[in-house]
């Protein structure tokens, strides 16, 4: 089977292997187990791989590089229009030769793929919509357009569209789905964590405005000023790092906040195991793997009530839903910090739920989609 993957994720070639963002590649390696030829259509950049990049494990890979593009300014729109004929031709040829088309959405390549796949109604397809599918949520116009095409059963045929959560107006080709990070054999017993001494919080993710790492720091600052012994470790890199460093220095928070940068999966896993809470005050998510991973290793999740997060946290029974109000959110956390029994109950429910979604279950679900 020629399985053709269309994605906007940046790739790097090193020592004849292709590298990209680890959680994405880890998932695609599972899809790749079920096909004998993997064709990747994606941007290819020069440079060196980072700690958060891993390589594909498939033995038969063909890579078709496409130029990256965006429509964020008049200049970029003009440049994109110049690139468009070549881009369309590359995607069209790849789809023409595909036994199975797989689109990764939302994204620029996914958007183009949504249009071109209309020309191939008989080719089996899957699309992974990794963003927020909630039709009532605020989304960029290009995201809404991708959703509209994917759920249109006249334009988009012979497809299963994988989305996070169940939403109003879902058509017959939309399938509620999930994701996973850890295998069944990795599960270890939950060790009790006392809310005595320093209570550890962890933030994992890109340091970008949309994920609000500054708000996570401000939560810690507010709790600290109220007399709570808290500590936050921030894992990730991004354009907001300098802003975070300045804030930490200006407010003398060096003893309670540390920026750890990008780290390997093993280091992050240990950090989850050592932490009491995982916090993600993000504006937009699909299925936030950081929250699911933290829950898996015994952290109580603290996250914004967006997308399927309320479902993941069982509307507060398995964690704390943020309201993006510093005082209200600090108070919510403080209530749990004062109650060991409440903390233990949320923690145990969170771990029990997250451990239902192992890589073993995920592999079986993927196999049913493409075999």
Image (cartoon, helix red, strand yellow):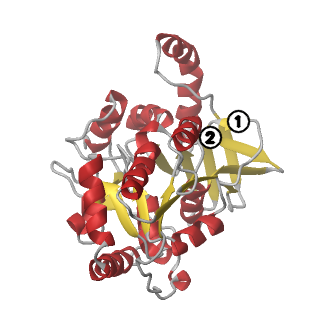
Q: Residue at x 21, y 50 (%)?
A: 171
Q: Residue furthest left?
A: 168
Please tell me which residue lies in front, 207 or 147. Answer: 207
Specify few, some or many for label 1: CA neighbours under 10 Å numbering under 14, 14-19, or 20 or more: some
Q: Are marks 2 and 1 in contact (CB under 8 Å)?
A: yes
> Quadrant of residue 321 in the image?
bottom left
In this picture, residue 61 sits left or right of residue 294: right
In this picture, residue 337 sits left or right of residue 11: left
- Mark 1 lies on a secondary structure that is strand
Mark nearer the N terminus (2 vs 1): 2
Q: Which mark is residue 10?
A: 2
Residue 167 lies, with reference to residue 359, above or below; the image says: above
Q: Which mark is residue 8?
A: none
Q: Residue at x 26, y 59 (%)?
A: 331
Image x and y of residue 224, in percent: 41, 57
Image x and y of residue 106, in percent: 41, 40
Q: Which mark is residue 45?
A: 1
Q: Quadrant of the N terminus?
A: bottom right
- How much space separates mark 2 and mark 1, taking CA atoms? 7 Å
């Amino acid at each position: 089977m020629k399985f053709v993957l269309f994605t906007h994720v940046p790739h790097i070639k090193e020592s004849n292997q292709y590298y990209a963002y680890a959680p994405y590649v880890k998932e695609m390696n599972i899809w790749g187990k079920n096909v004998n030829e993997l064709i990747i259509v994606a941007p290819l950049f020069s440079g060196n791989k980072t700690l958060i990049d891993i390589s594909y494990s498939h033995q038969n890979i063909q890579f078709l590089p496409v130029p990256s593009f965006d429509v964020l300014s008049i200049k970029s729109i003009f440049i994109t229009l110049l690139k468009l004929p070549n881009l369309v031709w590359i995607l069209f040829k790849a789809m023409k030769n595909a036994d199975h088309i797989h689109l990764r959405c939302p994204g620029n390549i996914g958007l183009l793929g949504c249009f071109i796949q209309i020309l191939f109604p008989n080719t089996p397809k899957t699309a992974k919509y990794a963003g927020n599918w909630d039709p009532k949520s605020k989304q960029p116009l290009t995201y809404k357009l991708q959703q509209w095409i994917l759920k249109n059963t006249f334009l988009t045929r012979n497809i299963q569209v994988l989305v996070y959560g169940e939403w109003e107006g879902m058509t017959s080709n939309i399938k509620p789905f999930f994701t996973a990070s850890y295998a069944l054999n990795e599960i270890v017993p939950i060790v009790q964590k006392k809310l005595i001494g320093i209570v550890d919080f962890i933030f994992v993710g890109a340091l970008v405005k949309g994920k609000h790492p500054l708000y996570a720091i401000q939560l810690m600052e507010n709790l600290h000023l109220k007399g709570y012994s808290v500590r936050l470790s921030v894992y990730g890199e991004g354009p907001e790092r300098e802003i975070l460093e300045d804030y930490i220095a200006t407010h003398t928070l060096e003893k309670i906040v540390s920026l750890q940068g990008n780290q390997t999966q093993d280091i992050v896993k240990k950090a989850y195991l050592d932490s009491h809470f995982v916090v993600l005050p993000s504006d937009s998510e699909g299925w936030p793997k950081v929250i699911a991973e933290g829950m898996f290793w015994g952290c109580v999740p603290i996250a914004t009530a967006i997308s399927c997060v309320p479902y993941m946290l069982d509307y507060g029974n398995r964690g704390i839903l943020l309201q993006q109000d510093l005082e209200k959110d600090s108070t919510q956390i403080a209530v749990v910090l004062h109650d060991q029994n409440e903390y233990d109950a949320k923690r145990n429910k969170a771990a029990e739920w997250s451990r239902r979604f192992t890589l073993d279950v995920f592999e079986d679900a993927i196999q049913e989609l493409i075999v």
